[in-house]
Amino acid sequence: MIFKMGELFCGAGGLALGAKEAKVKDYRIEHVWANDIDYWACETFRKNICPEKPEIVIWGDVRELKIEDLPQIDAFAFGFPCNDFSIVGEQRGLNGNYGPLYSYGVKVLKIHRPLFFVAENVSGLKSANEGYAFTKILNELEKAGTNEKQYELTIHLYKFEEYGVPQRRHRIIIVGIRKDLGLKFKVPAPTHKGNYISAKKALENIPEDAPNQEKTKHSPKVIELLKHIPPGKNAWCEEVPLELRLNVKGAKLSQIYRRLHPDEPAYTITGSGGGGTHVYHWTEPRALTNRERARLQTFPDYFEFLGPKEQVRKQIGMAVPPKASKIIFEAVLKTFAGESYPYVEENKGDYYQSLFDFVYS
């Protein structure tokens, strides 16, 4: 069976690449439409996910999308915007500009009633609006459709470093299967628990002709600052001379000019932020290139991101690692194919765990 998939908030195609590569027996997934408001992300998606059918990518605001007119689908994916749920920000949740956008995913479920869906968001979703947002979103996802065609949900806080991603990236993934099908998705067991892939291993042997290799231009002061920061530490460490320390009031954020540790997974790659947030090499006094960031996100070297350098950085940081996506979609296909696979009990996430992840990852 070929599942015809639609996707909202598709970004550059992290979820999509994993879905495209997932194959179980005669079961596979093929996109028939995708939408995002980011112009360059749509261009990247067209080039890498559906070069033979670029017209299926719809660039525009989801609030102006005529969902009822889109081609019928069997599967649906949406990594709804996380800006208002992230514990790094104000966590305005449903009261923010982006928080309510999940409702367009619910609308797709109500109109198209796909056989299954996969939704993704940050671990902070659990704690936004004192937990109300998470409860409301799960309730609406479960009850989308008619009484006979509502959804059986499996909610899990995935630690992607346990699935072969060389990065400590923790995300809530919600998998829903229509209840009338009588199937229950089980969380695939970690493949690399205790055997993580290090940043050094992930960044080995990048071809010279790989795309997106532009380096960041640093000021002499930043270069000198980085030379004093040991691997795994940041701008606030005691090794930095007083004259080079940052004059910043308030919290000393752990990610500012933080260098990678070569023997450990990277910390979370982000898509935005000013000076000091670009992720820094452990020996060379510089920020990573976008290709190196893409490696830490498990994008293959042939995957070319289009657009200006900072737009590419945004696309990479906002993506779901394709390697983790593939594992999840393969588990979905195995569920439909009746194949067994190693699994673990679902863990819906925890507010205090989310805070721990932010402080120490």
Image: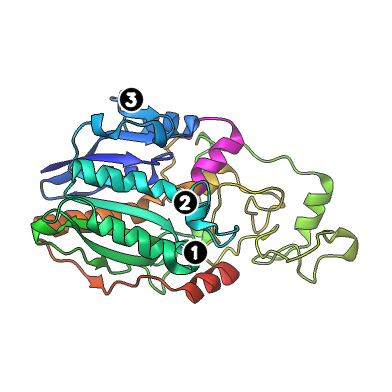
The one nearer the camera, 28 or 64, is: 64
Q: Position of residue 272 (x, y in %)?
A: 60, 47
Q: Can you identify the residue that label 2 sits on?
A: 99
- The quarter in which the C terminus is drawn is bottom right
Q: Residue furthest right?
A: 243
Q: Earlier in the sequence, mark 2 or mark 3?
A: 3
Question: In x, y percent, where is residue 162?
Answer: 39, 67
- The tag earlier along the polypeptide, 3 or 1, is 3
Colour scheme of the picture: rainbow
Assess whether residue 161 is covered by the magenta stretch.
Answer: no
Number of marks in the rendered image: 3
Q: Which residues are magenta?
A: 305-317
Task: Say which amino acid is labelled 1.
Answer: Asn
Q: Are marks 1 and 2 in contact (CB under 8 Å)?
A: no
At mark 1, the secondary structure is: helix
The residue carrying pointer 1 sits among few (fewer than 14), some (14 to 19) or many (20 or more) residues within 10 Å by Cα, namely some
| Eye-nearest disc, 2 or 3 | 2
Q: Quadrant location of residue 8? A: top left
Q: What whole-number distance in Å separates the C-alpha atoms at marks 2 and 3?
A: 29 Å
Tag shown at residue 27: none
**Dot 2 amino acid type:** Gly
Q: Which residue is mark 1?
A: 129
Q: Give me the C-alpha separation between circle 3 and circle 1.
A: 39 Å
Q: Secondary structure at mark 2?
A: helix
Q: Secondary structure at mark 3?
A: helix
> Residue 143's spot in the image, x, y percent?
23, 57
Which residue is pictured at 14% across the width and 53% down the height?
149
239 and 46: which is toward the camera: 46
Callout 3 touching callout 1 (CB < 8 Å) = no
Which of the numbered marks, if any, corresponds to residue 54?
Answer: 3
